[in-house]
Image: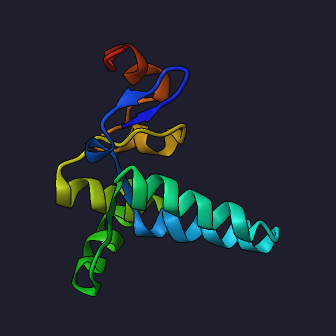
Amino acid sequence: MLTGCWLNIPAANLYLTEFSLYSVGIILIRKRQYGVFVVMVQDLIEKAGVNVLRLLPSDMAEVANHAQSFNLEFDDAYQYAVAEKYDLTIVSFDSDFDSTTRGRKKPAEIAPLLPHS
């Protein structure tokens, strides 16, 4: 279970793309925050059990299709393709998803929906 000021949701219901994991890794390693990256992976994925999802090379045509259809950059098209493939809701601050069929939820929109202890 991950908990925080507004977050109280089973980690088994949370998903992170491998792309996002690597993106955070790139930033933290570039900033020489090696330990922070390792602890993040251990805490979120290994201990809490947040699910990590990836796309296969055979899914890249869908990424390109979503990029073209919704005028998304690669990173957003990848996230969108994962959401489509696994039928997930996109939770993001990024308004680029607003022009897509699937749309997005803002983090503040899901906070009232989460169970509180």
Q: Is residue 109 left or right of residue 60?
A: right
- Residue 2 vertical placement versus 116 (above, below): below
Q: Is residue 81 above or below residue 91?
A: below
Question: Which of the 4 image quarters holds residue 71?
Answer: bottom left
Question: Number of labelled discs?
Answer: 0
Judge whether 32 appears above or below 4 on screen. Answer: below
Q: Is residue 29 above or below residue 24?
A: below
Asked whether, in this view, residue 117 is left or right of residue 41, the answer is: left
- Residue toward you, 42 or 110: 42
Q: Residue at x 34, y 53 (%)?
A: 49
Task: Choose top left, top right, bottom left or bottom right for residue 53.
Answer: bottom left
- Residue 55 coordinates in the image, percent (x, y): 29, 74
Residue 66 locus on image (x, y percent):
32, 62
Q: Give percent across and percent down for residue 46.
A: 41, 61
Furthest toward the front, the residue is 47
Q: Quadrant of the N terminus?
A: top left
